[in-house]
Amino acid sequence: MRWEYDGYVPADERLRESLCTLGNGRFATRGALPECAADDVHYPGTYAAGCYDRLTSDVAGHRVENEDLVNLPNWLPLRFRLPGADWLTPDTAPVLEHRQILHLADGTLERRTRYGLGAGQVLYVRQYRLVHMGDPYLAALRTEFTAEGFAGDLEVEAALDGNVRNAGVPRYRDLAGDHLISVHTGGAGPDTVWLGCRTRTSDIRMGMAARLTAPAPVTEGNGPLRAVQRLRLTLKPGRTRTVDKTVALHTSRDPAITDPLEAAVDRVRAAAGFDELHRTHRSAWHQLWRRTALDVPGEAGRILRLHLFHVLQTLSPHTADLDVGVPARGLHGEAYRGHVCWDELFVLPFLNLHFPEVSRALLRYRHRRLDRARAAARAIGRRGAMYPWQSAGDGREESQSLHLNPRSGRWLPDHTHLQRHIGSAVAYNVWRYCEATDDTEFRHTKAADMLLQIARFWADSATWDDRLGRHRIRGVMGPDEYHDAYPDASAPGLDDNAYTNVTAAWVLARTLELLDSLPEPRRRELTERTGLDDAELQRWEEVSRTLHVPFHDGVVSQFEGYGDLAELDWNEYRKRYGDIRRLDRILEAEGDTVNRYKASKQADVLMLGYLFSPAELHTLFQQLGHELDEETWARTVDHYLSRTSHGSTLSGLVHGWVLARARRADAWTFVQETLRGDIADVQGGTTGEGIHLGAMAGTLDLVQRGLTGLETREGALWLDPVPLPELSSYGMSLRYRGHWGVRLRLRRGRLEIAVPSSDGSPIDIRLPDRAVCVEPGDTCVLVLLDRNGAPAHGPTGPG
């Protein structure tokens, strides 16, 4: 399992740096070349999960606060040169060969470069890098130098660089980015240097220490912002000289330490050599691959393993010990400022069936910020909890108030904080986690706390309309994001976004179900503490049945009034602009607004088909007094599919998921686009600012749950496979309710289920046409049937 790049292409460096990021769930470092400093080509960022800092900027006449995931001191620097010559970099010296190899199996990045020195002389540089998956505070860099066609000395300089800032996203460069202060450096013996600093406002202290091991004396040259080590190697033709740099990183957020700088120095002194670090790191990765075994053939399988690699680097078992959420762009860059949005909706369903302890930790991040969400609701005169669209350190709303349109150069009001549906996403993840794990302690405590307050917010947000005879939720935004107001309206917000209302009804119904299932003493505690009474519960039940869902022309309307909007000439805009994914920016630069048109950035109504199975969605609409039959849903899918620009990497994922059941022949096109989303940078430069974690995890979950029809409910695994012709054979390993390594394999119309030996209970398996019970240690092979009761793929031979 490897991912390779050949040749040095400056224009591709940011993309490669993101996709070659190494991390361990606690911190990660972009795949930048160690000899290159941050500039317009390179950006060597390092980020620790949950390490945020808040600064105020003057932008377009406004004072704007932004909290960023902080770019930490750069531990990578290691540069080299011939005595008296310039430092060698691919931008300043002839590059005869250059290759980067991301070894997925053992989580290392290999780099090979041949620098031409003139007169037939060549310096061959080979490096191996790791961010340790076993010890989440360590990283290491091995550099091998080989002289070809010459002999002589080579000067090497290694450093810890505190002269860094957040500048990885061009459109944010007008915002303040100098987060590190009190930078100081020093030495701790003949081969070790250190650097300490803290963040400007959040006052997170950090310590970094580096140990240099080389076949030559090491000297220090520390400055106020850089801890520097230097040495001189004697090279002989064909003989390799090796320099190892081992680094430890601690912050004041780490448990069981007193001082992060002292802890970093102690850890790096005690660290093993590179070979032993590589061995233990490789062992930790092999354990992760076993727990997440995914067997998908061909190019799709290759890309899925890359996606899984980056998900595991962002959210590993180490994350279970942290107070962090799901960063939308991973720990791979500074896009979205490292904020937590709704992307967890696409990530946690995958984690629930592999690393439930990580899912639980990510949900505890939300629970710890429940009081802040309740304060946000009170601030707008509502009861319950209103979770922020973008969250970071303490759970306040971090959505920007202004955003820059690069096409027009204008800073525009940003109303994305009106995406109140984030509360339903939190509730959905809470519910699905409890279903998958049967974690009754969490269900009865933290889950009940959050669901109650989210349900209370939705019930209090609903107002009765006598004309419609229905409850309505006004002044919100849906997942689409293009529409934030009605045409020519003086204030932002839309009424009765279908996705918002249907998911709010689902939250209310599920919360009532949960409260009804609580042990009586716990229910009494909860109602006493929250003031919940029968009258409020009755209102929840009423609102859950009467929320308004608008329709037009026989399809579900994205929001009330959507059907009155103008049609866009899609062919004309594609002809004029080619790529119209960011149609909103195109129209704004023309002096127009997407609010006037039936046009969506990404799936909105169709998100309902992503969250809920066809049967569950049918029941939801039925409870709301609507008949959503197959024909109505098919018309709805077709309507929005032809009016969506797919300006988000999540859009192709959702459409592929929905079409796999609604219109299978077209599903693969969208699945392919989502698979290629980051590796081909289909959004036009955004991957270099950080990978799209939700889309990557979503492709894994597409195989895990989407194509298998897998649901975890009523104490059983429900399966309803819908194999795509292009992806009809695959296998995976799951962790389900105490069973580690449950194997599912779909092949030639047969579904094989293997449960490892244990003292656990049997697993109930439900298919549309039958139910089976698989005992630990047993394997069950089922022939899949189509709707007519015939084998789904015709006659099959032995599996």
Image (cartoon, rainbow, N blue to C red):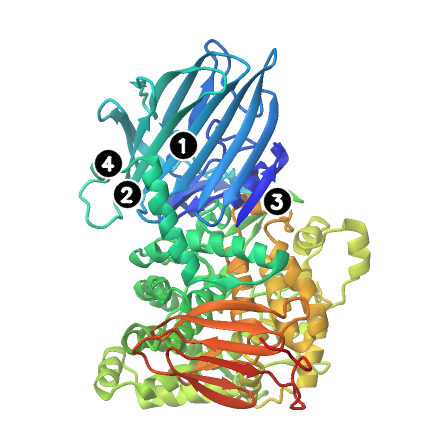
Question: In the depicted view, which residue is nearer to us: 130 or 373?
Answer: 130
Q: CA distance from mark 4 to mark 2?
A: 8 Å
Looking at the image, is mark 4 or mark 2 earlier in the sequence? 2
Under mark 4, the amino acid is Leu
In the image, what residue occupies the spot 27% across and 24% down?
191
- Left or right, residue 133 beside residue 302: left
Judged from the image, the secondary structure of the residue bearing numbered disc 4 is: helix
Looking at the image, is mark 4 or mark 3 earlier in the sequence? 4
Q: Can the viewer see residue 474 in this picture? A: no
- Res 652 → quadrant: bottom right
x and y percent of residue 555 in the render?
69, 80
Q: CA distance from mark 4 to mark 3?
A: 37 Å
Judged from the image, the secondary structure of the residue bearing numbered disc 2 is: strand
**Residue farthest to the front?**
798
Question: In the depicted view, which residue is nearer to us: 191 or 512?
Answer: 191
In the image, what residue occupies the spot 52% across and 87% down?
546
What's the mark number on residue 251?
2
Question: In the depicted view, which residue is nearer to us: 288 or 450?
Answer: 288
| As drawn, 599 above or below 16 | below
Looking at the image, is mark 3 or mark 1 earlier in the sequence? 1
What's the mark number on residue 142?
1
Q: Are marks 3 and 1 in contact (CB under 8 Å)?
A: no
Binning the other alpha carbons within 10 Å of mark 3 as few (below 14), some (14 to 19) or many (20 upward) gives some
Residue located beneath label 3 in the image: 685
What's the mark number on residue 261?
4
x and y percent of residue 76 in the render?
41, 32
- Res 493 → quadrant: bottom right
Question: In the depicted view, which residue is nearer to us: 223 or 531?
Answer: 223
Binning the other alpha carbons within 10 Å of mark 1 as few (below 14), some (14 to 19) or many (20 upward) gives some
